[in-house]
Amino acid sequence: MGLRSFPLVSVVMAARNYARFICEAIGSVRAQTLLNWELVIIDDGSSDDTPAAVRPYLSDPRVRYFRSDRLGQPRAKNLGIGFARAPLVAFLDADDAWEPTKLEQQLALFANPKVGVVFCARAIMDEEGAAVAAKPTSGLKRGAVLPQMFTQNFVCFSSCVVRREVFSRVGAFDPQWDLAIDYDLWLRVAKFYEFDFVNEELVSYRTGHGNLSKKLRDRVDTAMSIMHRAESRYAVADDVQTEVIADGYASTCQTLGYTMRASEPLTAVRWYLRALKWPARRFISVKGLVASVLALRTKRVPGSAENATANI
């Protein structure tokens, strides 16, 4: 039988209006040293040239293209999972790209039957595809990772490969969420499966082509809701200590406060005040609150450089 009949891994790529990036993403799948894959592209109602960009690749029988009508990311990805035929499912966002040995290295780790998800370190690139200097990926965790995952989602989505049976056991992406859909999934998966990783930058994650500050605020709000639901519905407290749960809430608020401190100090003040609700990291919250208040006062000084720039 040919490669098309028995793929080892199905790559799900949901895309909307990413014609300018999708050729690079598809090319990185076709360049894999592991040949036995299929690529399931879900074009979620694109209004740009995405269909034309994909068309030349359809001569490869491993590339399958489906067009949907604006389902949204969770439903589009779930549709891709439904079309997938392999025992392993990988995800690649249409604006990211892989290194050639990614799948080959990751699939070897599924020899451990307890492992449900394998991911890898990531590199950062800008909108044009140029490498961006960034701190080396740190804090990657393997094994039973639910406590660490509650505190921080350390899995780059475009880096993950998931055992297909996982979705039958814990469900797929929840359409309730527009953002952080992978975080919600990983919290469910981590209750039953181990995680593993390849400590090598095998995926390039693209940044700089969206409203980062607004998306970040929305993402944190969503993450807080997901954490609360994990407590109330997924019984996370059975496996995660109370102190760790508090630390997760506090650190999430602090992250947004720190990120917004320079550009929107008033927003940062609000998030640091919110972080004070939890005893964990309280000293860090107070320090961040003081720094944000000082930044806010500086912005309000008449004739300051910040005011001058804002009024140009």
Image (cartoon, grey):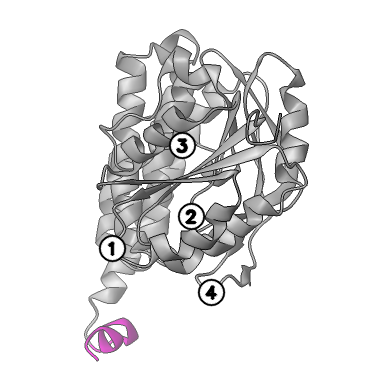
Closest to the observer: 252 or 43?
43
Q: Of the two numbered discs 2 and 4 on the same chain, state the one appearing first in sequence.
A: 2
Q: Secondary structure at mark 4?
A: loop
Q: Residues within 10 Å of mark 2 (few under 14, many from 20)?
A: many
For the stretch drawn in magenta, the main secondary structure is helix
Dots 1 and 3: beta carbons under 8 Å?
no
Badge number at residue 4: none
Alpha carbon distance from label 1 to label 3: 46 Å
**Front position among marks 1 and 3:** 1
Identify residue for label 3. 281
**Front position among marks 3 and 2:** 2
* Corner quadrant of residue 296: bottom left
Q: Secondary structure at mark 2?
A: loop
Dots 1 and 4: beta carbons under 8 Å?
no
Badge number at residue 128: 4
Alpha carbon distance from label 4 to label 3: 38 Å
**Front position among marks 4 and 3:** 4
Badge number at residue 47: 1
Closest to the observer: 28 or 211?
28
151 left or right of 231? right
Closest to the observer: 33 or 283?
33
